[in-house]
Image (cartoon, rainbow, N blue to C red):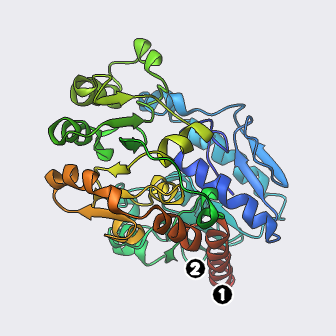
Amino acid sequence: MNAGPWLPVPPHGYGGIENVIATLVPELRRLGVEIVLATVGDSELPAEERLAAYPSGRFEQLQRPYNQVCGVVPAHQHAVVRRLDRGDIDLIHDHVEAAGLTMLAGLGVDAPPGLHTLHWDLRKHPELYGTFNGGSRVRVNGVSADQLTHAPAALRAHAVGHVHLATPLADGADRRPPAEKGAYAVVLGRITPGKGQDLAVRLAHAAGFDLVLAGPVGPYQQPADLEAADPQNPDVRFWQEKVAPHVDGDRVRWVGTVAGADRDDLVAAAQATLFPLRWNEPGGTAVVESLALGTPVVGIARGCLPELVEHGRTGLITTDDEELGELVHAAGKIPEFECRAEAARRFTPAVMAEAYLSLYEKVRTAGHG
């Protein structure tokens, strides 16, 4: 299970892919799968074995100039390749963008079969995805059906399906007592143009609802961290130019990265979790977490949202940006129990693990065909 070199598993706060792996691995092990986890040294997720090229995550380097960071992923991937030399790995499940896919293809016909999970926008890297050929040994999967529709034909030819993301919060969600709701909406996630926080803060003032932003600005986790922020960081520029002018501490607040019980309490008490998407969200971890906590989703009907949210039952979605404000006010009519029941049925770790076991069998069969 190749988690990459950027963050520990589980992550300390924000970490989309790493949270997915932290959710999947325990359930796979419960089902009898033995896991060698390729990660960083300060990961704490139990596995049969862990390997790492770095003592801690390299996330703070992610947006530095290419010539400063171009060796980070190769060093990690090289550690993975060296571990394969022992010959005891049945399948490689890779989560490293672009470089993971090329590593799998370059290992040669005698290597174990590989499954590469696509967690991002598949319109990226057209020169790679548009020409990819992994033979019979390499397969890919999406994290939503919509995501795969945007893949070039060459990549889509290697797809074995999609698996929706899951959350441990969905376990027993239908038996959890209702939360006491506050009078605010929340936007979760890294503050970046694709997530649309600029639209959210503008709508909060225009439509008259209180809004809490929870998530980092680039590598900066808390408001105090921004005092020493790199002004060339694109997320910092987005924050300073498009979001911060509307954050008044009253109608709109930014609380930085919120994790664990604090994050769960914040979401569970919200009237709605708002997804003002400016891009086709591939997977939507925060969507399924919101439903598991009994908070309806309000958002733009892009990417995976129409697959995860049933309009009128577990949330309200629209194609009209300006309608979002009205929908936030209407979200209180969505029954909390419906959200939690849907999460317990569709988005538990057990459901995701069983789906991946099925994909593993497809990949192994193809790889040995």
* Numbered disc 2: secondary structure: loop
Q: Quadrant of the N terminus?
A: bottom right
**Which quarter of the picture shows residue 95?**
bottom right
In this rendered view, identify the residue nearer to me: 76 or 260. Answer: 260
Residue 309 at x, y = what percent? 39, 67
Q: How would you rate the neighbour count of disc 1 (Cα within 10 Å): few for under 14, some for 14-19, many for 20 or more?
A: few
Residue type (three-letter) at the residue carrying disc 2: Ser
Mark 1 and mark 2: Cα distance apart in space: 7 Å
- Looking at the figure, which quarter contains the C terminus? bottom right
Viewer-side residue, 297 vs 268: 268
Residue 182 on image: x %, y %: 42, 42
Question: On the image, numbered disc 2 is attached to which residue?
Answer: 136
Q: Is residue 302 above or below residue 70?
A: below
- State yes or no: discs 1 and 2 in contact (Cβ < 8 Å): yes
**Rendering coords of residue 115 (x, y %):** 60, 68
Given residues 341 and 15, the one toward you in this image is 341
Residue 189: x percent and y percent?
Answer: 43, 42
First in sequence, mark 1 or 2: give its number. 2
Question: Image height check: is 322 above or below 93?
Answer: above
SS for dot 1:
loop
The image quadrant that residue 152 belongs to is bottom left
Q: Name the residue at 57% across, 42% down.
A: 73
What amino acid is found at the position of numbered circle 1 in the picture?
Answer: Gly
Q: Against 219, is 209 above or below?
A: below
Q: Is residue 86 above or below residue 257?
A: below
Q: Residue sitting at 46 percent across and 61 percent down? A: 336
Q: Which residue is mark 1?
A: 369
